[in-house]
Image (cartoon, rainbow, N blue to C red):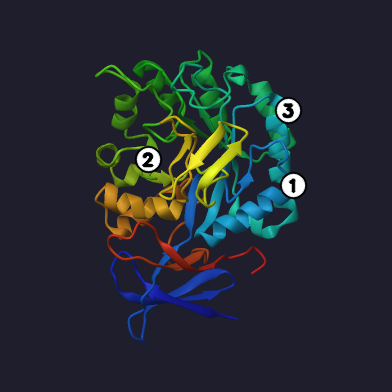
Amino acid sequence: MSSTVTGRDPGTGRTITVTIDGGRIVAIDPATATEDPCWLTPGLIDLQVNGFGGHDLNADDVSPRTVIDLTHALRAHGVTTFVPTIITAAHDRIAHALAQLAAARRFDPAVRHAIPYVHLEGPHISPAEGPRGVHDPEHIRPPSEREFKAWQAACDDLIGMVTLSPHYAEAPAYTAWLADRGVHVAIGHTHAAPAELTAVVDAGARLCTHLGNGAHAVLPRHPNYLWTQLADDRLTAGFIADGHHLPDDTLTAMIRAKGLDRSLLVSDAVSLAGMPPGRYDVPVGGSVDLTPDGRLARTGTPYLAGAARGLADGVAQAIRAARLSLGDALRLATVNPGRFVGGRGKLEVGAAADLVRFAWAPGDTRLTIESVRVARPQE
């Protein structure tokens, strides 16, 4: 049985009616009713989620229930597709987290629909202070095909993205090996030289993980690893637009350098994202303070302890900080990341009916989610 959803198209401002049948969009027509106060967008797509709403994918006690609850929490905030991100850790700990994610997908069709694959952010990153961020230096190590095969065996071949630093001698060959297997390779947490960066792009790397973060506090004016990644048109860059990780001018300049086609937004959210402001004790970082504007920092220091705003907030922040239109900002959180998850994120006939209605007006610091519809596999 078909159903309809109505809202304003962020690209044109016109009110449209979307007809859905079998979990797919079958028609998009001008609305016959009066103008709808809400906007309508494809579900948001977040390629980097460590946790949200108190649910932590990298915690010791992560379980299928963690993954299921996280999926529902993100959906309520407009994210209908997300890529769970597992960070640097001991081999067995990574394998355990991957196994829990695979079990949740087997158990729950909604989770299976929401999670296309898993992102390994490390452990093959830079050990240098600054580029490694908060990753545990004890467990940073070079790429290993043998180790990757063991991880894939633990999770039904669920790993679909790997972030690495190109400074390792093994990085180009490892990148080509992953790309041949359909795994997206991203550059991140690196101190690599320009030639090392270009070598892994030549081998098949196509993404930059939260460009501008996971970097030294002070860099040579030129050359440096930021310019090389910004200049290479083969790379699509992810940006954290939470108002804290990148200053407004930096975010604006980086998106303009990459261009709208090669930019996307990620939340890089940790478990305290979506939680009330206050002081918390967390496994990574110890005592941290979460402010009402979403800044998460180690208590008594100016240092960030992760990202604590969801992707919907990032869209609103990008509009203000990077001088984007609503339609362009949403493009960075739907169509563009959708290219890396099988072409999702489109508002067109034939697309999956993952749809979000929301309220927003110029000057708003967040999108206010009114309703979310997800095209579950059984539909």
The first of marks 3 and 2 along the sequence is: 3
Residue drawn at 56 percent across, 65 percent down: 374
Task: Pick the residue in front: 189 or 257.
Answer: 189
Q: Amino acid at mark 3?
A: Asp
Residue 27 lies, with reference to residue 93, above or below; the image says below
Q: Residue under circle 2?
A: 244
Quarter assignment of residue 39: bottom left
Where 290 sits versus 153, above or below? below
Tag 1's secondary structure?
helix
Label 1 Cα neighbours within 10 Å, binned few <14 / some 14-19 / many ≥20: some
Drawn side of residue 161 relative to residue 335, left or right: right
Q: Is residue 49 visible?
A: no
Number of numbered discs present? 3
Measured as percent of width and height from the top left, residue 64 is found at 73, 48
Kindly check if marks 1 and 2 are in contact, taking CB atoms under 8 A apart as contact: no
Q: Gap in Å between the C-alphas at discs 3 and 2?
A: 33 Å
Q: Position of residue 265 (x, y in %)?
A: 40, 46
Q: Which residue is mark 3?
A: 92
Q: Nearer the viewer, residue 301 or 188?
A: 301
Q: Residue at x 64, y 37 (%)?
A: 58
The local secondary structure at tag 2 comes to loop
Above-or-below relation of 25 to 93: below
Give the labeled residue for mark 1: 103
Q: Is residue 130 left or right of residue 183?
A: left
